[in-house]
């Protein structure tokens, strides 16, 4: 597998402990490391060990990908298994498929979440690129295609013994000379549901399928998280804290020798 995505893995517990520590801030003592994807569970465990996060919370953020348009499309913080699965999908693309993937990301279609982006890879066979990079270019291409296709028919009209047919051929030629290629290309592209990108005219055939529904669809061999997601520890409420403080105070008072009892019987 070849490198598709570089991501920063951060020891969030250590980063949190750094707050207010001016010495660490001054020395840029950050607990993070860049890691390349696709990867393996063993490699992830080593990276977590390197940043001291084997038994700590960590986050995956900041990305540098081989498809630069993807950098801004990825979520601010990614699930490590989903990120690896996306990298695996990208690694399996040939040159044409990668161009299509890049075009979709550039267009902004189907990029609302990591799930959407993975589904772009799952729908590559339903997407197409044409070598037209602007409405003007597409209009000129279509016009030339139809000229070639109907060249024989127009020639027959122009050589017809019927004056009306010859007049029709001349009229078609005049219209062709005044064709607004840009408007024509824009109209046809809109009818096709296409969008112009730096890779060409992107079109879709059929409905975009939701093949990938979430992390539960990731095959076991591509899961690299070192352990199942841990449930966050429940935070005690204010009332719980007050009750605990009261209990501790009462316990401390009962342990002091010679401390008078504060029962109602003693007061009486």
Image (cartoon, rainbow, N blue to C red):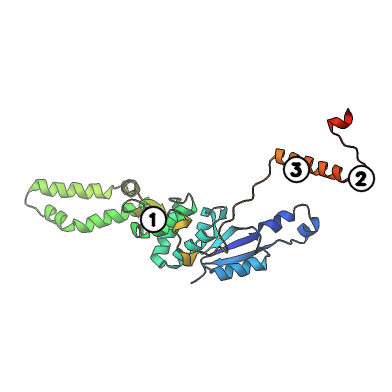
Label 1 environment density (alpha carbons within 10 Å; few <14, some 14–19, many ≥20): some
Distance (Cα) linking label 2 and label 1: 72 Å
N-terminal of the pair, mark 3 or mark 2, is 3
Q: Is residue 134 above or below residue 5?
A: above
Q: State left or right for residue 64 relative to residue 163.
A: right
**In the figure, 12 relative to 222: above or below?**
above
Query: Which residue is more in the foreground, 49 or 113?
Result: 49
Residue 221 at x, y percent in the picture: 47, 67
Of labels 3 and 1, earlier in sequence is: 1
- Nearer the observer, 41 or 97: 41
Residue on which disc 2 sits: 257
Disc 1 secondary structure class: loop
Image-based side of 218 in relation to 150, left or right: right
> Real-space Cα distance between discs 3 and 1?
51 Å
- Give the number of the disc on residue 244: 3
* Mark-to-mark CA distance, 3 and 2: 23 Å
Quadrant containing the C terminus in the rendered view: top right
Left/right placement of residue 87 relative to residue 56 reads: left
Say which of marks 3 and 1 sits in front.
3
Which of label 2 and label 1 is nearer to you? 2
Residue 224: give x, y in percent of width and height. Answer: 53, 65
Earlier-in-chain disc, 2 versus 1: 1
For image coordinates 89% across by 45% down, the residue present is 256
* Badge 2: residue crowd in 10 Å (few <14, some 14–19, many ≥20): few
Q: Which mark is residue 211?
A: 1
Whether label 3 touches label 1, CB < 8 Å: no
Q: Quadrant of residue 242?
A: top right
Residue closest to the far top: 268
């Amino acid at each position: 597998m070849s490198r598709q995505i570089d991501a920063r893995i951060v020891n969030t517990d250590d980063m949190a402990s750094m707050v207010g520590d001016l010495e660490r801030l001054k020395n840029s003592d950050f607990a993070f490391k860049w890691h390349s994807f696709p990867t393996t569970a063993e490699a992830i465990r080593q990276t977590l060990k390197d940043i001291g996060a084997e038994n700590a919370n960590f986050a995956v953020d900041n990305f540098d990908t081989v498809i630069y348009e993807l950098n801004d499309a990825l979520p601010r913080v990614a699930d490590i298994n989903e990120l690896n699965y996306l990298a695996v999908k990208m690694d399996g693309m040939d040159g044409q498929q990668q161009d299509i993937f890049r075009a979709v990301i550039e267009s902004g279609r189907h990029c609302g979440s990591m799930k959407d982006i993975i589904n772009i890879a799952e729908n590559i066979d339903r997407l197409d690129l044409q070598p037209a990079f602007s409405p003007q270019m597409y209009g000129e291409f279509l016009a030339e295609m139809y000229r070639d296709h109907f060249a024989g028919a127009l020639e027959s009209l122009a050589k017809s013994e019927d004056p009306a047919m010859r007049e029709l051929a001349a009229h078609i030629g005049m219209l062709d000379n005044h064709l607004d290629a840009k408007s024509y290309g824009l109209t046809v592209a809109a009818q096709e549901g296409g969008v112009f990108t730096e890779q060409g005219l992107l079109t879709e055939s059929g409905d975009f399928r939701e093949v990938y529904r979430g992390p539960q669809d990731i095959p076991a061999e591509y899961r690299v998280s070192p352990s199942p997601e841990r449930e966050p520890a429940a935070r005690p409420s204010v009332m719980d804290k007050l009750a605990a403080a009261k209990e501790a105070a009462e316990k401390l008072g009962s342990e002091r020798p010679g401390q008078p009892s504060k029962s109602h019987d003693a007061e009486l």
